[in-house]
Image (spheres, rainbow, N blue to C red):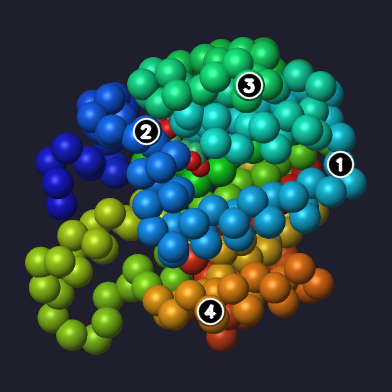
Protein backbone atom coordinates (compact mmCIF):
# COMPACT_ATOMS: atom_id res chain seq x y z
CA UNK A 1 0.00 0.00 0.00
CA UNK A 2 1.19 3.49 -0.76
CA UNK A 3 2.97 5.17 2.17
CA UNK A 4 1.06 8.32 1.31
CA UNK A 5 -2.36 6.82 1.93
CA UNK A 6 -2.61 4.93 5.20
CA UNK A 7 -6.26 4.32 5.97
CA UNK A 8 -5.53 3.76 9.63
CA UNK A 9 -4.04 7.20 10.15
CA UNK A 10 -6.22 10.30 9.98
CA UNK A 11 -3.23 12.65 9.60
CA UNK A 12 -2.04 10.64 6.61
CA UNK A 13 -5.51 10.85 5.05
CA UNK A 14 -5.53 14.63 5.43
CA UNK A 15 -2.00 14.83 4.03
CA UNK A 16 -3.04 12.62 1.13
CA UNK A 17 -5.96 14.83 0.12
CA UNK A 18 -4.13 18.09 0.83
CA UNK A 19 -1.32 17.11 -1.56
CA UNK A 20 -3.35 15.16 -4.11
CA UNK A 21 -6.06 17.74 -4.80
CA UNK A 22 -3.83 20.66 -5.91
CA UNK A 23 -2.08 18.26 -8.32
CA UNK A 24 -5.29 17.32 -10.13
CA UNK A 25 -5.55 19.22 -13.37
CA UNK A 26 -9.33 19.10 -13.63
CA UNK A 27 -10.21 18.91 -9.94
CA UNK A 28 -11.63 16.23 -7.66
CA UNK A 29 -15.05 15.81 -9.26
CA UNK A 30 -13.60 15.05 -12.69
CA UNK A 31 -11.06 12.69 -11.11
CA UNK A 32 -13.41 10.81 -8.79
CA UNK A 33 -16.84 10.91 -10.38
CA UNK A 34 -16.32 11.51 -14.11
CA UNK A 35 -13.08 9.82 -15.13
CA UNK A 36 -14.68 6.66 -16.59
CA UNK A 37 -18.15 5.39 -17.58
CA UNK A 38 -18.13 3.21 -14.44
CA UNK A 39 -17.37 6.18 -12.18
CA UNK A 40 -20.14 8.17 -13.85
CA UNK A 41 -22.48 5.27 -13.19
CA UNK A 42 -21.40 5.28 -9.52
CA UNK A 43 -22.20 8.97 -9.38
CA UNK A 44 -25.66 8.51 -10.95
CA UNK A 45 -26.58 5.69 -8.61
CA UNK A 46 -25.38 7.56 -5.52
CA UNK A 47 -27.35 10.60 -6.62
CA UNK A 48 -30.46 8.50 -7.27
CA UNK A 49 -30.19 6.75 -3.89
CA UNK A 50 -29.89 10.07 -2.13
CA UNK A 51 -32.79 11.70 -3.97
CA UNK A 52 -35.10 8.72 -3.41
CA UNK A 53 -34.31 8.65 0.29
CA UNK A 54 -34.76 12.38 0.80
CA UNK A 55 -37.86 12.77 -1.40
CA UNK A 56 -40.30 13.60 1.42
CA UNK A 57 -37.91 14.96 4.01
CA UNK A 58 -37.13 18.52 5.02
CA UNK A 59 -34.73 19.68 7.70
CA UNK A 60 -33.77 22.96 9.38
CA UNK A 61 -30.16 22.56 10.39
CA UNK A 62 -28.01 20.01 8.56
CA UNK A 63 -24.35 18.99 8.66
CA UNK A 64 -22.41 16.95 6.14
CA UNK A 65 -19.26 15.30 7.48
CA UNK A 66 -16.51 14.47 4.99
CA UNK A 67 -18.11 16.92 2.59
CA UNK A 68 -15.00 17.21 0.40
CA UNK A 69 -15.43 19.76 -2.43
CA UNK A 70 -19.23 19.90 -1.90
CA UNK A 71 -20.16 17.25 -4.47
CA UNK A 72 -23.48 16.46 -2.76
CA UNK A 73 -24.26 19.73 -0.98
CA UNK A 74 -26.49 21.16 -3.73
CA UNK A 75 -28.80 18.16 -3.30
CA UNK A 76 -28.69 18.27 0.50
CA UNK A 77 -29.37 22.01 0.51
CA UNK A 78 -32.59 21.39 -1.45
CA UNK A 79 -33.85 19.62 1.67
CA UNK A 80 -32.46 21.91 4.37
CA UNK A 81 -32.71 25.51 5.54
CA UNK A 82 -29.15 25.72 6.80
CA UNK A 83 -26.32 23.47 5.69
CA UNK A 84 -22.80 23.24 7.07
CA UNK A 85 -19.95 21.13 5.70
CA UNK A 86 -17.10 19.64 7.73
CA UNK A 87 -13.98 18.02 6.31
CA UNK A 88 -10.49 17.30 7.58
CA UNK A 89 -8.84 18.43 4.34
CA UNK A 90 -8.67 22.15 3.68
CA UNK A 91 -7.73 21.56 0.04
CA UNK A 92 -10.88 19.49 -0.43
CA UNK A 93 -13.04 22.26 1.05
CA UNK A 94 -11.41 24.83 -1.25
CA UNK A 95 -13.20 23.03 -4.09
CA UNK A 96 -16.58 24.28 -2.80
CA UNK A 97 -18.03 27.39 -4.41
CA UNK A 98 -20.72 29.92 -3.51
CA UNK A 99 -23.12 28.04 -5.84
CA UNK A 100 -23.03 25.05 -3.51
CA UNK A 101 -25.43 26.67 -1.00
CA UNK A 102 -23.41 25.83 2.07
CA UNK A 103 -23.76 28.33 4.90
CA UNK A 104 -20.58 27.33 6.65
CA UNK A 105 -17.52 25.25 5.84
CA UNK A 106 -15.30 24.00 8.59
CA UNK A 107 -12.02 22.12 8.55
CA UNK A 108 -12.29 19.63 11.42
CA UNK A 109 -12.11 15.98 12.37
CA UNK A 110 -15.27 13.86 12.34
CA UNK A 111 -14.32 12.70 15.85
CA UNK A 112 -14.47 16.23 17.27
CA UNK A 113 -17.11 18.23 15.48
CA UNK A 114 -17.00 21.92 16.43
CA UNK A 115 -20.74 21.81 17.10
CA UNK A 116 -22.77 22.08 20.30
CA UNK A 117 -24.55 18.95 21.50
CA UNK A 118 -28.07 18.24 20.27
CA UNK A 119 -28.60 21.12 17.83
CA UNK A 120 -28.47 19.38 14.44
CA UNK A 121 -31.63 18.01 12.73
CA UNK A 122 -29.87 15.79 10.23
CA UNK A 123 -26.32 14.58 9.67
CA UNK A 124 -25.03 13.16 6.39
CA UNK A 125 -21.77 11.44 5.61
CA UNK A 126 -21.36 10.31 2.03
CA UNK A 127 -18.40 8.21 0.85
CA UNK A 128 -16.26 9.30 3.79
CA UNK A 129 -16.79 6.83 6.67
CA UNK A 130 -14.52 4.28 4.98
CA UNK A 131 -11.65 6.68 5.71
CA UNK A 132 -12.41 7.06 9.45
CA UNK A 133 -10.12 4.60 11.27
CA UNK A 134 -12.39 4.55 14.34
CA UNK A 135 -15.96 4.26 13.06
CA UNK A 136 -17.46 3.89 16.57
CA UNK A 137 -15.89 7.17 17.67
CA UNK A 138 -17.32 8.99 14.66
CA UNK A 139 -20.83 7.52 15.12
CA UNK A 140 -20.72 8.47 18.82
CA UNK A 141 -19.89 12.04 17.82
CA UNK A 142 -22.73 12.07 15.26
CA UNK A 143 -25.08 10.97 18.04
CA UNK A 144 -23.86 13.77 20.32
CA UNK A 145 -24.57 16.63 17.90
CA UNK A 146 -27.98 15.36 16.71
CA UNK A 147 -31.17 16.52 18.42
CA UNK A 148 -33.41 13.82 19.87
CA UNK A 149 -35.33 12.52 16.85
CA UNK A 150 -32.51 13.70 14.56
CA UNK A 151 -31.85 11.87 11.29
CA UNK A 152 -28.62 10.16 10.26
CA UNK A 153 -27.69 9.08 6.73
CA UNK A 154 -24.40 7.39 5.86
CA UNK A 155 -23.34 6.11 2.45
CA UNK A 156 -20.16 4.06 2.48
CA UNK A 157 -18.34 1.32 0.59
CA UNK A 158 -19.34 -2.28 1.25
CA UNK A 159 -16.71 -4.62 2.66
CA UNK A 160 -18.62 -7.61 1.22
CA UNK A 161 -18.62 -6.30 -2.35
CA UNK A 162 -17.16 -9.01 -4.60
CA UNK A 163 -15.08 -6.51 -6.57
CA UNK A 164 -13.07 -5.59 -3.45
CA UNK A 165 -12.61 -9.07 -2.02
CA UNK A 166 -9.70 -11.40 -2.48
CA UNK A 167 -10.43 -14.24 -4.87
CA UNK A 168 -9.31 -17.72 -3.75
CA UNK A 169 -5.85 -17.39 -5.16
CA UNK A 170 -2.59 -15.87 -4.07
CA UNK A 171 -2.62 -12.11 -3.96
CA UNK A 172 -0.56 -10.48 -6.64
CA UNK A 173 0.79 -6.96 -6.16
CA UNK A 174 -1.96 -5.28 -8.08
CA UNK A 175 -4.65 -7.06 -6.12
CA UNK A 176 -3.08 -6.53 -2.70
CA UNK A 177 -2.77 -2.79 -3.44
CA UNK A 178 -6.46 -2.75 -4.32
CA UNK A 179 -7.33 -4.66 -1.14
CA UNK A 180 -5.27 -2.28 1.01
CA UNK A 181 -7.16 0.65 -0.40
CA UNK A 182 -10.40 -0.89 0.81
CA UNK A 183 -9.27 -1.92 4.27
CA UNK A 184 -11.48 0.75 5.88
CA UNK A 185 -14.67 -0.61 4.33
CA UNK A 186 -17.26 -2.13 6.66
CA UNK A 187 -20.12 -4.54 6.13
CA UNK A 188 -23.72 -3.27 6.27
CA UNK A 189 -24.54 -5.47 9.28
CA UNK A 190 -21.47 -4.26 11.19
CA UNK A 191 -22.31 -0.59 10.63
CA UNK A 192 -25.99 -1.12 11.45
CA UNK A 193 -25.12 -2.75 14.77
CA UNK A 194 -22.55 -0.05 15.58
CA UNK A 195 -25.20 2.61 14.99
CA UNK A 196 -27.69 0.74 17.15
CA UNK A 197 -25.14 0.33 19.94
CA UNK A 198 -24.65 4.10 20.03
CA UNK A 199 -28.36 4.50 20.79
CA UNK A 200 -29.87 5.15 17.33
CA UNK A 201 -33.19 3.48 16.44
CA UNK A 202 -35.12 2.64 13.24
CA UNK A 203 -31.87 1.59 11.56
CA UNK A 204 -32.40 0.81 7.87
CA UNK A 205 -29.96 -0.51 5.24
CA UNK A 206 -30.43 0.03 1.51
CA UNK A 207 -28.16 -0.68 -1.45
CA UNK A 208 -26.73 2.58 -2.86
CA UNK A 209 -24.56 1.42 -5.78
CA UNK A 210 -25.37 -1.97 -7.31
CA UNK A 211 -23.72 -3.92 -10.15
CA UNK A 212 -20.76 -6.21 -10.22
CA UNK A 213 -19.39 -6.66 -13.73
CA UNK A 214 -17.63 -4.10 -15.89
CA UNK A 215 -20.40 -4.55 -18.43
CA UNK A 216 -22.14 -1.19 -18.07
CA UNK A 217 -25.51 -2.07 -19.63
CA UNK A 218 -26.10 -4.40 -16.66
CA UNK A 219 -25.50 -1.55 -14.21
CA UNK A 220 -27.88 0.63 -16.16
CA UNK A 221 -30.62 -2.01 -16.18
CA UNK A 222 -30.26 -2.39 -12.41
CA UNK A 223 -30.43 1.38 -12.02
CA UNK A 224 -33.66 1.45 -14.06
CA UNK A 225 -35.19 -1.32 -11.95
CA UNK A 226 -34.27 0.55 -8.78
CA UNK A 227 -36.31 3.52 -9.92
CA UNK A 228 -39.40 1.48 -9.03
CA UNK A 229 -38.08 -0.66 -6.24
CA UNK A 230 -35.44 0.05 -3.63
CA UNK A 231 -35.34 -2.78 -1.12
CA UNK A 232 -34.35 -2.16 2.48
CA UNK A 233 -33.47 -4.24 5.52
CA UNK A 234 -32.53 -3.57 9.11
CA UNK A 235 -29.90 -6.22 9.74
CA UNK A 236 -28.01 -6.83 6.51
CA UNK A 237 -28.31 -7.08 2.75
CA UNK A 238 -29.20 -10.64 1.60
CA UNK A 239 -26.08 -12.55 0.60
CA UNK A 240 -27.06 -12.87 -3.05
CA UNK A 241 -27.22 -9.09 -3.44
CA UNK A 242 -24.50 -8.15 -0.94
CA UNK A 243 -21.63 -9.21 -3.18
CA UNK A 244 -22.97 -7.05 -6.02
CA UNK A 245 -23.51 -3.98 -3.80
CA UNK A 246 -20.54 -1.63 -4.09
CA UNK A 247 -21.92 0.91 -1.59
CA UNK A 248 -24.79 0.90 0.84
CA UNK A 249 -26.82 3.48 2.74
CA UNK A 250 -27.68 3.31 6.42
CA UNK A 251 -30.33 5.61 7.87
CA UNK A 252 -31.38 5.92 11.51
CA UNK A 253 -32.99 8.26 14.03
CA UNK A 254 -31.64 9.40 17.38
C1 LIG B 1 -13.61 10.13 -0.90
S1 LIG B 1 -13.77 11.73 -0.24
C2 LIG B 1 -15.50 11.99 -0.44
C3 LIG B 1 -15.86 13.43 -0.62
C4 LIG B 1 -17.36 13.64 -0.96
N1 LIG B 1 -18.19 13.34 0.17
C5 LIG B 1 -17.76 12.80 -2.15
O1 LIG B 1 -18.57 11.89 -2.01
O2 LIG B 1 -17.25 13.06 -3.24
C6 LIG B 1 -13.62 11.46 1.50
C7 LIG B 1 -13.58 12.75 2.30
O3 LIG B 1 -13.59 12.43 3.70
C8 LIG B 1 -12.70 13.35 4.35
N2 LIG B 1 -12.26 12.76 5.63
C9 LIG B 1 -11.51 11.66 5.80
N3 LIG B 1 -11.30 11.44 7.10
C10 LIG B 1 -11.94 12.43 7.78
C11 LIG B 1 -12.11 12.74 9.16
N4 LIG B 1 -11.57 11.98 10.12
N5 LIG B 1 -12.85 13.83 9.48
C12 LIG B 1 -13.42 14.61 8.52
N6 LIG B 1 -13.29 14.36 7.20
C13 LIG B 1 -12.57 13.28 6.83
C14 LIG B 1 -11.57 13.51 3.35
O4 LIG B 1 -10.79 14.65 3.60
C15 LIG B 1 -12.34 13.57 2.04
O5 LIG B 1 -12.69 14.88 1.70
For the residues labelled 4 and 1, the Cα–Cα distance comes to: 32 Å
Is label 4 in contact with label 1 (beta carbons under 8 Å)? no
For the residues labelled 1 and 2, the Cα–Cα distance comes to: 31 Å
* Nearer to us: label 4 or label 1: 4
Point out the image quarter for the C terminus. Answer: top right
The residue beneath circle 3 is 99
Q: Do we see residue 190 in this rendering?
A: no
The residue beneath circle 2 is 27
Is label 3 in contact with label 1 (beta carbons under 8 Å)? no
The residue beneath circle 1 is 57
Q: Which type of secondary structure does the marked residue at label 1 adopt?
A: loop
Disc nearer the start of the sequence (2/4): 2
In the depicted structure, whether residue 70 falls above or below residue 155 = above
Q: Which type of secondary structure does the marked residue at label 2 adopt?
A: helix
The residue beneath circle 4 is 217
Disc nearer the start of the sequence (4/1): 1
For the residues labelled 3 and 4, the Cα–Cα distance comes to: 33 Å
In the depicted structure, whether residue 139 falls above or below residue 95 = below
Q: Which type of secondary structure does the marked residue at label 3 adopt?
A: helix
For the residues labelled 2 and 3, the Cα–Cα distance comes to: 16 Å
What is the x, y in percent for residue 6? Answer: 23, 42
Amino acid sequence: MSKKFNLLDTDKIREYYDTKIPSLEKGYFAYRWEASPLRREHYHQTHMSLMQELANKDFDCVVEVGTGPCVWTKFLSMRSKLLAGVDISLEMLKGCSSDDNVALLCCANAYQLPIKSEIINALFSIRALEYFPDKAKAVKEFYRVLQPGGYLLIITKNRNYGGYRSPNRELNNRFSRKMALHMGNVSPEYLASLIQQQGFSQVRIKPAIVGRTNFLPIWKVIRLLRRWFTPQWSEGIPRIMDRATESFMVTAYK
